[in-house]
Image (cartoon, grey):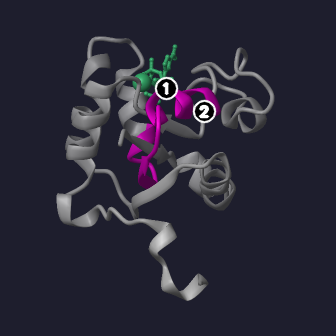
Amino acid sequence: MERTFLMVKPDGVQRNLIGDIVSRFENKGFQLVGAKLMQVTEELAQQHYGEHKERPFFGELVDFITSGPVFAMVWEGENVISTARLLVGATNPTESAPGTIRGDYAVTVGKNIIHGSDSPESAVREIGLFFNEEELVSYDKTMSTWII
Ligand code: RTP
Ligand code: MG
């Protein structure tokens, strides 16, 4: 089953959007397999956003993502990588459609609430950067005896 890495950025945590964002992915039908509130270090930020290190906004991006706690998550499901990007919305909130997370909550590209892996390769790389294997849980909700 496919997995992706999603992260509520410091602006989303500060604006109390963790619950809403988790609900959107639960309601869609995806399964949470790992999550934690954490402070991103400068080193982790530079690794995570390494592909942008030559871009003029790289310094601001690293400063922003380390400015407060983030909520890091791994979600599992059919086509979850591309579908999660649809739910996240376009990078620039001036272009993200209403109904998407960025379309509903963000106004500026530098503070766009949430990160989502953009490919299977990115998902594997980012999950490995943020989580140890023992922090991820595979489980089958249909086997839960307390709801039978
Ligand atoms: P993310 O990696 O955060 O999920 O965002 P994304 O794939 O939609 O966009 P990406 O191209 O990977 O850019 C990473 C983040 O850099 C900031 N950005 N600023 N000032 C600018 O022109 C600019 N362009 C990108 C955004 O916060 C974007 O999420
Ligand atoms: Mg990206």
Q: At 70% from the left edge and 21% from the top edge, which residue is drawn?
A: 96
Nearer to us: label 2 or label 1: 1
Give the residue type that dot 1 points to. Answer: Ser
The one of 141 and 124 positioned closer to us in this rendering? 141
Which residue lies at the image location 59% right of the left edge and 47% below the top edge? 11
| Residue 57 location (% of width, % of height) | 42, 19
Which of the labelled discs sits on residue 88, or is there none? 2
The amino acid marked with disc number 2 is Val
Question: Does the Cβ of the disc 2 residue fall within 8 Å of ligand 1?
Answer: yes
Quarter of the image holding residue 102? top right
Which residue is rendered at x = 59% and y = 40% of the image?
113
Corner quadrant of residue 55? top left
SS at mark 1? Answer: helix
Q: Residues within 10 Å of mark 1 (few under 14, many from 20)?
A: some
Asked if the magenta segment contains residue 78, the reply would be yes
Identify the residue shown where x is 32% and y is 34%.
Answer: 123
Q: Is mark 1 within 8 Å of ligand 1?
A: no
**Stretch in magenta:** 64-87
Q: At which x and y percent is residue 122?
A: 29, 28
- 53 sits left or right of 8 in the view: left
**Disc 1 designates what residue?**
82
Residue at disc 2, secondary structure: helix
Q: In the displayed structure, does residue 6 sit left or right of residue 11? A: left
**Where does ligand 2 appear, by image quarter?**
top left
Mark pair 2, 1: CA separation: 10 Å
Q: Is residue 21 above or below residue 135?
A: above
| Residue 49 in sight here | no
Q: Where is residue 18 shown, x and y percent of the image?
A: 60, 58
Q: Is residue 1 visible?
A: yes
State the residue in front, 67 or 17.
17
